[in-house]
Amino acid sequence: MAEFLDLREAVARNLKDGDIVAFEGFTHLIPHAAAHEAIRQGIKDLTLIRMTPDIIYDQMIGMGLAKKVVFSYAGNPGVGLLRRMRDAIENHFPRAIETIEHSHSAMAQAYEAGASGLPMAVFRGYKGADLPKVNPEIKTVTCPFTGEELAAIPSHRPDVSFIHAQKASAKGDVLIEGIIGVQKEAALAARRVVVTVEEVVPDFKGLHPNLCILPHWTIDAIAVVPGGAHPSYTHGYYARDNAAYLEWDKISADRELFAAWMKDNVLAAGPEVFAGRVEGLR
């Protein structure tokens, strides 16, 4: 049942060392504020799951929080590679990480299977692909009805999933508008769910009920963090900060510059800074 907490308490209660965790959002609504709080709390040995991990996972990996990353395509969108992730893979800095790579479709299917309480996802895919050669979790099964050979992978069952959304009602229901990636599936597949939102409204009266994609009983904690998706965008609230993504390519290329930026912009800053960062993007 959803409980309204400040971000620090929401993270502290729900994310622990060694957890399997998803910070999900697709193009917009990426929960940067929540991930920054995890960094400030120094939570370690995490298995990070995410479709298209971008700069927020680069930051978490660069700060040594991750031991394993399960993902499909990793990059700074529209710019290039994730330099902190590459440094961890190639040079084991600041620590070695294990990587499990999938296709976008496989990641979505694994979330869907987890949300359905299934141990694995079964789908058509990976035929003629090279990923099965480097990912031992990709198996094949034979359909008992048609005899067709299908791909099978373990379902995603995070200990906790974090997402960002536009609104929560006073009751604790959560409304997401605009592009929806796998946020709903990531939440329903998880044992615990934390949602950061731009604002709380009395209710969703007058809106179509299908817009309320997460009812309060699927959520453990809600934290109000205006601007909590920056530098990604939140549909209807603020635009994508393209300059921040370009700047990150330079910051992340140098270990000392990265450490200094994280100290000034994450370790020494709380969630209230996010609202200030988006004022010029509205």
Image (cartoon, grey):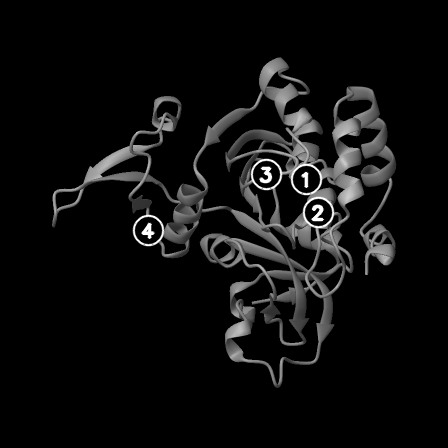
- Amino acid type of disc 1? Ile
Image coords of residue 70 (percent x, y): 49, 35
At 37% from the left edge and 51% from the top edge, which residue is drawn? 113
Q: Tell whether 93 sits left or right of 256.
A: left
Q: Are marks 3 and 1 in contact (CB under 8 Å)?
A: yes
- Amino acid type of disc 2? His
Q: Are marks 2 and 4 in contact (CB under 8 Å)?
A: no
Say which quadrant the N terminus sits in. Answer: bottom right
Q: Earlier in the sequence, mark 1 or mark 4?
A: 1
- Tell me the SS state at disc 2: helix
Q: Is residue 172 above or below residue 53?
A: below
Q: In the image, which is nearer the foreground, mark 2 or mark 3?
A: 3
Q: Are marks 1 and 4 in contact (CB under 8 Å)?
A: no
Q: Which residue is mark 3?
A: 53
In space, the residues marked 1 and 2 are separated at their CA atoms by: 6 Å
Q: Earlier in the sequence, mark 2 or mark 4?
A: 2
At 21% from the left edge and 38% from the top edge, which residue is drawn? 141
Q: Which residue is mark 1?
A: 56
Q: Tell whether 279 sits left or right of 2.
A: right
- Amino acid type of disc 3? Pro
Q: Is residue 119 above or below residue 129?
A: below
Which of the 4 quarters of the picture holds residue 6? bottom right
Image coords of residue 215 (percent x, y): 53, 70
Q: Which residue is mark 4?
A: 118
